[in-house]
Amino acid sequence: MRAVVLYRSISGFTRKYAQWIAENLGADLYDCRKVEPRALSGYDLVVFGGSLRQGRINGIDAIKRDFAALEGKRIVIFATGGSSAREGIAEEISAANFSEEQRRKLRLYYFRGGLDIGKLGIGDKILMAHRKRSLLRKRSEDLTPDEKDFLAACANPADGAEKENIRALVDYARS
């Protein structure tokens, strides 16, 4: 099996997971911005990872734009975010990012990454500050677990990336 791992990382957490996955699969590793879709023709397995930004997978258009060109390949997607993994999150992310037809042709995994606002660009810092302000207006008991994780990470940079999180993805890719 010839495999490639593509990723789009903003602050390094997605890149870390992509490197671990590529090492475990013996796969080639590329930032998705540096690969043309036609360069994927020689691969049997295409893994793509991106961080979540307002529920959307960062960089996923690189895969979706030429999804038909991936016909016959195994497609695995992973998304990283600052929140803990919870029941149903992969399905929510998949539904928000892919058509029903596309979802039938891929497998999606969610991994907790982290949040380090200091590593973000100015636009993302502004978005994060806005989100933080809106959450601080809520009563503590009304905050969701994801919102509490976000506020905690705003106060102290969080790195929830753990190598063992990739095990299910790697096992699936090898099956």
Image (cartoon, grey):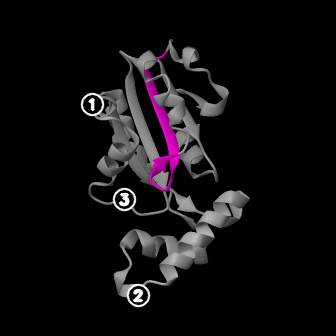
Q: Looking at the image, how many numbered discs can be counted on the residues? A: 3
The residue at the point 31 percent across, 34 percent down is 103
Q: Are marks 2 and 1 in contact (CB under 8 Å)?
A: no
Sequence-wise, the earlier of marks 2 and 3 is 3
Residue at mark 2 to residue at mark 3: CA–CA distance = 23 Å
As drawn, the label of residue 104 is: 1
The segment highlighted magenta reads 43-57
Residue at mark 2 to residue at mark 1: CA–CA distance = 40 Å
Q: Residue 171 at what x, y percent from top left?
A: 33, 36
For residue 107, side relative to residue 79 (left or right):
left
Q: Which tag is nearer the camera, tag 3 or tag 1? A: 1
Residue at mark 3 to residue at mark 1: CA–CA distance = 22 Å
For residue 103, side relative to residue 140 (left or right):
left
Instruction: State whether residue 44 appears in this view.
Output: no
Image quarter of residue 145 = bottom left
Q: Residue 120 at what x, y percent from top left?
A: 68, 58
The residue tagged 2 is 139
Sequence-wise, the earlier of marks 3 and 1 is 3
For residue 25, side relative to residue 103 (left or right):
right
- In the rendered view, would you say 137 is above or below 46? below
Instruction: State whether residue 93 appears in this view.
Output: yes
Hey, which residue is sitting farthest right in the picture?
122
Asked whether 103 or 40 is in front, the reply is: 103
SS for callout 3:
loop
Residue kind at label 3, given as amino acid type = Ala
The residue tagged 3 is 85
- In the rendered view, would you say 73 is above or below 108? above
